[in-house]
Each structure stands twice: as structure tokens, then as C-alpha cells.
Image (spheres, coloured by chain):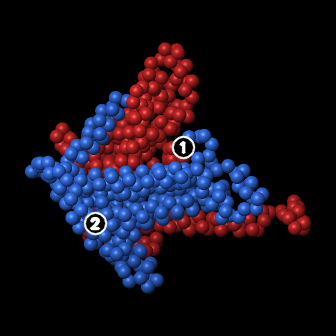
Amino acid sequence: MIPWLIGTAVLTIGPMAWSLYLSFTDYHLIRGGDWIGLRNYTAIFDDPMFYRTVRVTLLYVLIAVPVKLVASLLVAMLLSQHRRGMGFYRAAFYMPSLIAMSVGVALIWKALFSNGGVQDSVMSSFGWEGGGFLGNPSVSILMLVLLAVWSFGAPMVIFLAGLMQVPQELYEAADVDGAGKWSKFVRITLPMLSPVIFFNVLMETVGAFQLFGPAYIIGGESGAPAWSTLFYTVRIYTLAFTDFRMGYASAYAWLLVLAVGVVTVIMFRAAKRLVFYAGEDR
Amino acid sequence: MSVKTADGRVVVRNRRPTSERAKSALWHVSMLAVLAIVLYPLLWVVTASLKGNTDIITDTSLWPETITWEHFANAFDGLAGIPLWRFFWNSTLIAALSVVGVVISCSMTAYALGRLRFPGRTAMLGIVIATLLLPGQVMLIPQYLIFSELEVTNTYVPLVIGKFLALESFFVFLYIQFLRGIPRELDQAAKIDGAGHFRIFFSILLPLLRPAVVTSSIFTFIWSWNDFLGPLIYLYDMEKFPLPRLLQSYSNTEGVTNWGGMMAMTLLSLVPVVLFFLVFQKFLIKGIATSGVKG
């Protein structure tokens, strides 16, 4: 307990307060800095890079999270049918999520999506002329979306565990009433699964806002090509540890905290209306 | 056996009905299709690291025309005169320290938060859950300044200290979830027999927490093995680099011309995680399902 207290005080709450303070200074790792009030924040809103990086990050969150979750729910529902080999498939689908965020897989992705690479040659045979996603700014973000979808196994396992807890009597009762597949899905599966759906949506969204490693490997500090993979966290990293503009970078980081905080609060509010809890389990 | 169907006909069934078998076949076909897509990148990299350097990128097939082991020889040479095993050792050391830290500190913190009654407990539990969602980037700069003030940058201290101070909220949470499943009567009985907190924790609860210990160890190992941001910020000397940092340096220098060596090195760096997974997959899947669903 005591280590946690020290850790939380020294490495969480202390740094948070300090970083909030830094965000009101023009602190530079080498030159030091002074209090400049809100000028970092006003500068951010005049910074064209800010709008680029927000656009890239939001685009990623809005595409990757829903696609990944729908895919994982679909596969989880297929897997929940108790057929032979279910354990094997579940393990095989889960495995990529353990390595998807590693540098190694990001390098494999670079190879697969470079000009003349696997994706290029497969799509060329269908008439695609855009080359590899890696060099094409209008589609390069899809590499990261596909990487996220590839790691669908983690939410899938959680969906699967949730599906197993839905009482079978509900489906049997619905069968007696002559309900179709779709209405069983909408009226039974979705409500019973809603706490799990909420958990997955929340965790995946919060995680997606913070994507760093693969984006840094694939796009580098400048988010190549043409800023199209310049994720928000990469921008924070570059400002702080390449340009040493730590005050400005702290202001960037605090806007991310605010954004994630607002999204979390909205989701919890929405959950109050949409999530159905069966029994008094909670 | 004979069965009377809904419309009154009597049919003889000595095997499963064809519709059922067709459904089962369809299920397996769709599962295998998903499996093929999911595993393709990994199979591709296995064969890519055996192909000649000229056709690595452009060759989509999973079957190399000619097999060469030269890339693996290249990979084992490492980078800048430092052999590959050295980077493996660095990664292993960091991961092992992280595992020890997480198991000791997170389990004890969970005991305090999950079992004891003291003022401020609910607030602290709130902080643990809040840090689960808090973007870590906001703490990065002050933490860096603290560690450079303490002159521990370019060592492994910044990479593992958080693990010893129970800052991995996910695992604190996991242990709390497992503790909830252990009847309170056990520790109360021990208390009546005169056992103190340490005695109760180490002799009674920790053995029962074994599944949580295994799950948190494996996850810590894998996450630490994959961690890139920490080593990127804190380590400058190449001989201290763990594998992800080596791969990044390699891709910036050699990798541009030597795809084969890089793919071989990438493959080798992923092997331990995949092996770990194959050995412990039951624990992993159970662990993630528990922390997610009962949350």
C-alpha cells in the first residue's frame, strides 16, 4: 500500500500538477522558461499542425474503433455456437492482439503496404492505381486502421465471455414466441451484452486516442507521407523530446486529457440510458 | 432412429441431418477464412525472411522459390558490432524486473484496497480506476524531468520503477477482482487465530491468488517486451537497448537496404511472445475475460 501511495503521489499526481503548471510556461529543456499564462493554448489554436494532428487522430478513432468492435462482436457470436475447435479458433484470433502494437509488427506492416508490396499487388489486380498505402497520403491511415482491426481478438474474448453469460432460457422463450433471428439479436443479445459493449467501447476509444508506437514507426516524427499519419501523441513526443519545447508540449498533452475526459463523461452519461444491467450483480 | 417432424412425416435419421452438417461446414469455412486473413501477415514474414533480398517485398506468395538462411545470420550479427543476443538479454532483464515488481506491489496494493477498511479507501479506488483511463502522455514530461534530476536516465530504473510502485492500475484492478472471489471468512478466521496483515496476505491469500499472479506475470512480460515509448525516451546507449528500440534503429540504418535481415530480426523478436502465448493461452484468455466482464 505504501509503495502505491508514494508512486501515485510522486509519479502520478505530482507530475499531473507539474505538467499543468508547465503548460502555462514556455519551458524549454535547455533554456528553461517563464510563466506565460494562456499563451501556449492560444498558440496551439493558431498552429496548423494542431488541426492536422487532430484530424488524423479523430479520423482514426472514428473508423478504427467501430470497425474493430463490430468485427470482434461478429466473430464472437460465430464462436459462441459451441462447435468443435472453438477453443483453437479463439486462441488463434486472440494472439495477434498481443503483438499488434509492437515495433516488429509495425515493420511487417511497412513491408506489406509498401509500393509493389502484398497489398499493392493484390489491389492492382483489381485495377487499383494508388500504389502501396505506405506512400499514399490519402489512404496511409488505413494501414493503422487495419492494424487495429487485426487486433480484434482482445475485445472478441471479452464479448465471448459476455455472450456465454446470457441465459439460454431467454432465447428459448423467444423461440416459443416465434421471434426471428434479428429480433432475438436486437431484443436479447444486445441488451444483455450492453455492459460488455460499454466496457469495450470505452476502453477501445480511450486507447485509440493514445496510439503511439505503430504510428511513430510507420510515419516517423513528421507523420509521413504529408502528415497523414501524424497522430496526436506523436506530435506531443516530437515537441517534447526532439524540439525540447516541454511547456508547449504539456499544453498539447492537457488538451488530450480534456478531450479524453469529455468523451469518457459523455459515454458514462449515455451508458446510464443505454446500458441494461440484469439483476443486482453490480 | 426415427423422428416425427412438425408436418407429421416420419423420417429416418441415422446421421446428423444434412442441413445441420452443411451449417457446421459453413461455420468451419468462415472461421478458416477469418483465420487465414488473421495469420497471413505472420506466415508472410516467416517465408519473407527465407527469401532472397530482391523479391521479399514484391512476393505475395507464402512459398519461397529459393530458401536462404543468410538473413538470420545477418540478424544474429545485431547492429553496430553488438550481437543480437545482447538485445534479447536486455529485453529479458527489463521484462523480468517488471514482472517481479508488478506481482509484489500490485497484489499488496489490491489487498489493502480490496480488503481493509480505512479512511480515503473509496477515493483511492477511484484514483486507480481513473488512471486506467488517463492518457499517460500527460505525465511523460514531468516524469522525464524527475528522472533526469535523479540522474537515472539511460538506466532501466525509469522503465521498471512504476511497476514496483504499483502504478499498473490494470493489474491492481485485476487482483481486486480476484480477491472479491475469495471468501472473507478465510482472512477473518486467520485474524481470530492472531495472524497479522502480512501473515494473512502471504500465507492465505497469495496462494489462492495464483491464477491472478500467473495472468499478471504473463501480461507484464509481454507488454514490457513490446514497450517502445519508454526505451525511446530514456535509453541512449545502443548496448542498453531492448529489442523494439533495436528494431527501430535497425530499420533506420540497415533496414532501408536489407529487408531480409530486418524481417528475420523482427520474426526473432516476436517468437518469445508467441511461445509465451502458446504455453499460457488459457490463463491469458481467462484473465482478460474476468477483468473485462466482471468489471
- From the image, tell me which residue sits under label 2: A51
Q: Residue at x 28, y 49 (%)?
A: B138
Name the tint of chain A in the rendering: blue
Q: Nearer the viewer, residue A268 or B80?
A: A268
Residue B294: mark: 1
Q: Amino acid at mark 2?
A: Tyr
Instruction: Tell me if B131 is positioned left or right of B231 in this view.
Output: right
Q: Nearer the viewer, residue A86 or A194?
A: A194
The vertical placement of A45 against B84, above or below, is below
Instruction: Tell me if B219 is positioned left or right of B82 in this view.
Output: right
The C terminus of chain A: image quadrant:
top right
Mark 2 neighbour class, 10 Å CA radius: few under 14, some 14 to 19, many 20 or more: some
Q: Secondary structure at mark 1?
A: loop
* Chain letter, red: B
Residue B42 in the image: state x and y as whole percent.
44, 63
Residue B163 in the image: state x and y as whole percent.
34, 39
